[in-house]
Structure formats: C-alpha cells, structure tokens
C-alpha cells in the first residue's frame, strides 16, 4: 500500500469541485450567521434594552460555544467525516436563527446564540477536511486560502443586505429568512457532500514523522488523540498563530466596529459600513497573495507573514486610539486593511496543523487550532464591553470616543501574549523538524 495510490488525484474531478463548492457556500452562510448580530448591533441593543456588557455577552456566548466545540467537533469529524457533522451544524444554525427571530427576551436570545455557535463550529473544520480528502496535498494551502476568502463574503451579506432587510421589514422577518436559508442548506449538504472519493472506502493516514501509511478506522482513543495533537509543537504553533492574528478583526466586525465608527468617530451608518466593507474586501484580496507566499516560504511563514500581520495591526490600532480627537477617515481605512491581514494570516495556522499531524487526527488538530482565534476574540469582545460599562458608557446613548479609547486598549495584552508563544513554539517546531539544533540543557 502506498500513499500515492490512495491520495486524491492530482487533478480533482468535477465531483470534488462540486462538493467543495457546496461546502464553501455553506461556510458563507455560516459567516453570515456569525456576523449577523454585529451588523445590527444597535438595533439589537434597542430591541433587548441591553447595555454594552449584555450586548457583548451575545457575542461572547456564541464564540465561547464555538471555541469550546472545536475539539469535540474535530473528534467527531475524525470519527464520522464531514457530511453528517456539517448537516447537523447547518440544522443547529437554522434553529438558532429561528429562535432569534422569535425571541422575546435576552435569555432566549442568548440561547439562540448558543445554538448558532454550536452549529457554526462544525462548518469550517468540515470544509477543511473535505479539502484534505478530495484534493491533492500540494493544493492544500491555496485551497484553504480560497475557502477562507470566499467565506468572508458572508460578512458582506450580513453588513449590507441583512441590515437593509431589517430596516425595510421586521426583526422576525429578517432572522426568519436566514433560518429558512439554513434549512435549505441543511438539505443541500446532506444530499451533495460525501466524506471521501468513491474509490476509497476509508481515509488514509500518513504519519508525518515516520511516513507510515495506515487506514483510518476512527477507533482512536479521544484523550490520546488530543494529547498527541497538542504534544507536537507544530500544533501549538498553529494554535498560537490562530490565537494572535484574527481576533481583533473578529471583535471589530462581529460587534464593536460599527458602534466605534458611528458613535465614537462620528461617521454616518453608510460610511461606517463602507469601511467595514473595505475590511472584508481587503481580506479577500490579500488571501491569494498570502497563500502563495506561504507556499513559497514554508519554513519562514511565521517571520515573513504571521508576525508582520500582527505588528501591522498593533501599529494601526494604537495609532487610531492614540490620536487626541477623531481619526481622519483615511486612517480608519488603513485600520480596516491592517485588521484584514489577520484573516489570511490566520489560515497559515491550518497549514501548520495539517503539516504536522497524520490524517487520523487531522480534524482534532484543526479543532485545537481553530479554537485559538475564537478564544482570543471572545476575551477581547468581553473586555471591551466591560471596560465601556465600567466607564459608564455602556449604552448607545452614552458611547464616546474617550470611553472607546480606553476600552480598545484591551486587545494589546492578547497580542503580546500570542507573539511570545509564537516565537517559543516556532523554535520548538524547527528543532522537532531538524531545522535548528537542539538547545543545550
């Protein structure tokens, strides 16, 4: 048995592209669901009479469930494959948005976000697994980037059409419509998605350390799989890379960007939406560039791509909040582009996870990695909301530039923590790969 005999064809057929296309379309809808509250945050605050901490709680609960579900989802994907897990995820999101559409109180709305976070958690790792099982390994980095790029279109859908629908109709109609789309995609995913090519009756695992080929039977001890994934410094490098790069942009787009641009910076809603649209479009445009550079610089990705993206975000973020008055509009666009680098840079983390883990624990390692960015995002979102409340600026009527200036200091320690561990785990990974000499004790 050879790995070549069981690996996806070097030129994927139409079925592989069809399955990937449906998976990516489902991911677009998942991103729309995830960011739906951020686009109508002020409307949500008015509907539920919520202060900043409570509004942040919607996003924090959703992200906490998303992050907490990543490892269980990874284990389930390694055991059952993408099709049943994605189907369940789409159904949970549809139920979550239906509950949100009908929710009369904060408690029920929070339960809706729990359902949404649990469903959302299943989609992206499942699509990454489809990439690994239906496409050749050499296409992996660029396919992962394309998956992330196209998925970000969901933010534009949430930002413009969703907000317009809400203002033209009602809360129930708007979120009920998204629930209907979720139900449609539940059926589409179940009908079209297949776990692996028909010529294979199981996934094939190639151990990245020894080259040994084995058939994945999914009879793997859960605890052993998690410990084995985390024990490899490459997985830890992937976790901290994903922890550090996208969280500020996630916090900005998911909840705090629109209030900051309108209430603190004094922009009208359409202008603020334009800046956030630039964030989305810039992320989509940068994806192929960073993906190609990642392919060409496999051993320098942290220094050449990940860390520069983090430094650029820190510089733009601190410059905006350090100015004594509202920032010039051009600088807000610069901030949007700087934050946009985090999404494509975070995709490099999944290359680390795939490179340093055999297939039988691929999705477990992917889940560990994916949890990183959302753990950081939920911490940042909550701390920003808490900082606003502690300053007495917790409602849309009391938001101010000075209050946001203090609250937006909260992400800085998270960046510094992440950079520290990226440097540590990068060194350990290079030693493990034999690229650097072992440290002397």
Image (cartoon, helix red, strand yellow):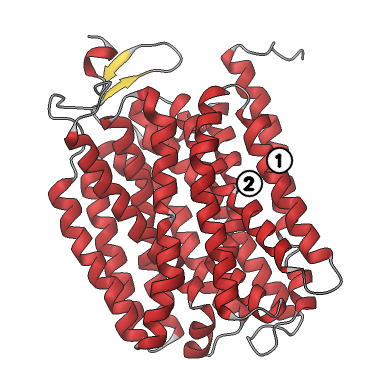
The residue under the point 29% across, 55% down is 26
The answer to whether 201 appears left or right of 417 in the picture is: left
When asked about the image quadrant of residue 153, the answer is: bottom left
Cβ–Cβ under 8 Å for marks 1 and 2? yes
Q: How many C-alpha atoms fall within 10 Å of the one at disc 1: few (<14), some, or many (≥20)?
A: many
Q: In which quarter of the image is the C terminus?
A: top right
Q: Could you tell whether 271 is left or right of 86 in the image?
A: right
Residue 166 sits above or below residue 132 on the image: below
Which numbered disc covers residue 419?
Answer: 1
Residue 222 seen from this side: yes
SS for tag 1? helix
Residue 145 rendering spot, x and y as whole percentages: 45, 40
Q: State the residue in front, 320 or 424.
A: 320
Foreground pick, 39 / 213: 39
Which residue is situated farthest in the right direction here? 324
Residue under numbered circle 2: 244
| Quarter containing the N terminus | top left
Q: Is residue 426 above or below residue 286?
A: above
Residue drawn at point x = 46 percent, y = 14 percent: 209
């Amino acid at each position: 048995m050879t790995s070549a005999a069981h690996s996806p064809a070097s030129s994927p057929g139409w079925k592989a592209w069809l399955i990937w296309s449906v998976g990516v379309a489902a991911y677009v809808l998942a991103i729309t669901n995830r960011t739906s509250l951020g686009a109508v945050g002020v409307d949500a605050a008015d509907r539920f009479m919520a202060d900043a901490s409570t509004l942040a709680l919607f996003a924090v609960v959703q992200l906490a469930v998303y992050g907490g579900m990543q490892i269980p989802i990874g284990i389930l994907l390694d055991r059952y494959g993408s099709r049943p897990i994605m189907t369940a995820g789409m159904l949970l999101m549809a139920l979550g948005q239906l509950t949100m559409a009908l929710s009369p109180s904060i408690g029920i709305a929070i339960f809706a976000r729990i359902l949404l976070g649990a469903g959302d958690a299943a989609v992206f790792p499942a699509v990454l697994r489809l990439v690994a099982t239906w496409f050749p390994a050499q296409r992996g980095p660029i396919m992962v980037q394309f998956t992330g790029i196209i998925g970000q279109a969901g933010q534009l859908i949430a930002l413009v059409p969703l907000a317009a629908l809400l203002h033209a109709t009602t809360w129930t109609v708007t979120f009920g419509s998204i629930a209907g789309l979720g139900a449609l995609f539940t059926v589409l995913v179940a009908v079209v998605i297949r776990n692996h090519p028909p010529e294979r009756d199981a996934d094939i695992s190639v151990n990245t350390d020894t080259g040994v080929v084995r058939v994945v039977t999914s009879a793997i001890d859960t605890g052993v799989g998690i410990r084995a994934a985390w024990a490899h410094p490459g997985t830890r490098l992937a976790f901290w890379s994903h922890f550090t790069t996208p969280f500020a942009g996630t916090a900005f787009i998911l909840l705090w960007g629109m209030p900051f641009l309108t209430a603190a910076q004094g922009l009208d809603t359409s202008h603020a939406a334009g800046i956030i649209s630039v964030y989305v479009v810039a992320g989509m445009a940068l994806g192929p560039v960073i993906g190609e550079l990642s392919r060409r610089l496999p051993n320098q990705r942290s220094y050449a791509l990940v860390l520069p993206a983090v430094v650029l975000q820190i510089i733009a973020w601190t410059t905006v909040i350090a100015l004594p008055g509202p920032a010039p509009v051009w600088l807000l666009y610069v901030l949007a582009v700087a934050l946009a680098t985090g999404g494509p840079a975070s995709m490099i983390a999944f290359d680390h996870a795939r490179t340093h883990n055999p297939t039988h624990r691929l999705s477990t390692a992917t889940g560990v990695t994916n949890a990183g960015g959302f753990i950081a995002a939920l911490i940042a979102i909550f701390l920003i909301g808490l900082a606003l409340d502690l300053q007495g600026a917790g409602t849309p009527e009391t938001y101010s530039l000075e209050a946001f200036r203090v609250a937006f200091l909260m992400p800085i320690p998270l960046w510094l923590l992440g950079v520290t561990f990226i440097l540590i785990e990068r060194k350990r990974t290079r030693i493990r790969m034999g690229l650097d000499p072992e440290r002397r004790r």
